[in-house]
């Protein structure tokens, strides 16, 4: 890889990926639409920092409508991380998910076919495509999403894999609940840490027994770069953290970082949430040489430390600084 495009470059995972690529001397065309999926101020601050590197060029654009022809001729790899995430809001605002996840992916692939079919495309999918499938989730098993978000990611993924049948070099990565510094404000760990630092109760959907295959963002980045270098095409691969952890255990780890107990309020299970996720990593290990390196204890410690420097404990009021 010499010159790549990263869509969603200013996002949570995208910005971490850009950091690692820039450190390796790779030139980047970063694309981001700065959508309203969460406060764009955070993303713009990250984009500003990335743009201070002479090897990073920022394109502000909506992939569902933009013409990227003049940029694709200059890149050898595209990391397609842009998209609209979040399960709960997808039930009430599916049009945005269809545009940002499905239409954007289809237009990107159409442009690759037309302009530069030699490009290697690595696309971010999601464990949400599995729904409540039996554990561990296997790429050769069934996919049955239980949320509109999951369906949008499955449709986008199918478009990526179908393109390989037409001669493009593509691979999709099914990310499993990514966490770490810069995590989106709608995601659980960040919400839990924010509440804990501000002496507010943590609100939990369900009883805490639900579990996830949480994956530290640096492991995700390493797998994503490895996928760009792999020869295989037309595959979807799981990228998980290697262990299944309950929400109750996550809260215990946050308490350990905080040094005191935290108040927790339990409520009904949320619509569209599955009880358990867990990745079969056999294919990722075989094809990518992937092996998650960060334990949940190490990852939460790193995320807690990062957000402790962001949030200020002001009793009932919490102020936020730029998250870069």
Image (cartoon, rainbow, N blue to C red):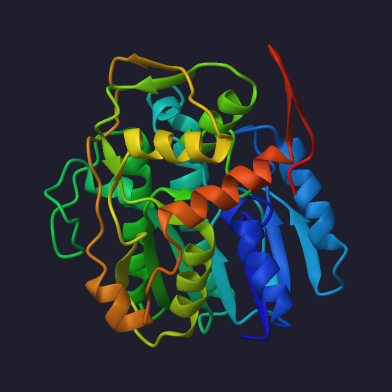
The image quadrant that residue 92 belongs to is top left
Residue 194 on image: x %, y %: 60, 29
Residue 78 on image: x %, y %: 57, 71
Return the residue found at the far front.
Answer: 259
Query: Which residue is drawn at the image coordinates 29% and 15% (left, top)?
Result: 268
Residue 182 on image: x %, y %: 64, 47
Query: Which residue is drawn at the image coordinates 37% and 24% (left, top)?
Result: 91
305 lies left or right of 321: left
Q: Give the quadrant of the N terminus.
A: bottom right
Query: Which residue is drawn at the image coordinates 84% and 53% (left, top)?
Result: 48
38 lies left or right of 87: right
Instruction: In the rendered view, tell whether residue 8 sits above or below residue 323.
Output: below
In-front residue for pair 122/43: 43
**Residue 149 appears in view:** yes
Instruction: In the rendered view, tell whether residue 90 sits above or below residue 304.
Output: above
Instruction: In the rendered view, tell whether residue 38 sits above or below residue 17.
Output: above
55 lies left or right of 167: right
**Residue 70 appears in view:** no
In-front residue for pair 36/118: 36
Residue 173 on image: x %, y %: 38, 64
Instruction: In the rendered view, tell whether residue 41 sits above or below residue 242.
Output: above
């Amino acid at each position: 890889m010499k010159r790549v495009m990263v869509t969603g470059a200013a996002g949570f995972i995208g910005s971490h990926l850009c950091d690692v690529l820039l450190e390796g001397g790779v030139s980047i065309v970063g694309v981001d639409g700065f959508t309203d999926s969460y406060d764009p101020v955070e993303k713009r601050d990250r984009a500003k920092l990335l743009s201070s590197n002479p090897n990073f060029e920022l394109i502000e654009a909506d992939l569902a409508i933009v013409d990227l022809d003049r940029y694709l001729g200059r890149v050898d790899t595209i990391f397609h991380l842009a998209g609209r995430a979040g399960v709960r809001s997808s039930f009430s605002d599916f049009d945005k998910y269809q545009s940002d996840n499905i239409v954007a992916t289809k237009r990107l692939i159409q442009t690759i076919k037309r302009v530069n079919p030699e490009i290697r495309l690595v696309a971010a999918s999601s464990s949400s495509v599995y729904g409540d499938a039996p554990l561990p989730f296997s790429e050769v098993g069934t996919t049955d999403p239980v949320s509109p978000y999951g369906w949008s990611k499955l449709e986008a993924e199918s478009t990526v894999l179908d393109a390989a049948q037409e001669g493009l070099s593509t691979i999709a990565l099914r990310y499993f609940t990514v966490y770490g510094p810069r995590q989106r404000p709608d995601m659980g760990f960040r919400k839990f840490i924010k509440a804990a630092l501000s002496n507010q109760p943590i609100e939990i959907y369900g009883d805490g027994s639900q579990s996830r295959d949480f994956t530290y963002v640096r492991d995700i980045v390493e797998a994503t770069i490895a996928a760009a270098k792999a020869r295989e095409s037309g595959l979807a691969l799981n990228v998980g953290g290697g262990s299944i952890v309950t929400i109750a255990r996550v809260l215990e780890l946050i308490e350990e970082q905080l040094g005191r107990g935290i108040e927790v309020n339990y409520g009904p299970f949320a619509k569209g949430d599955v009880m358990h996720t867990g990745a079969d990593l056999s294919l990722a290990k075989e094809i990518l040489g992937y092996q998650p390196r960060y334990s949940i204890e190490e990852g939460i410690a790193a995320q807690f430390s990062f957000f402790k420097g962001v949030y200020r404990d002001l009793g009932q009021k919490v102020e936020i600084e730029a998250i870069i």
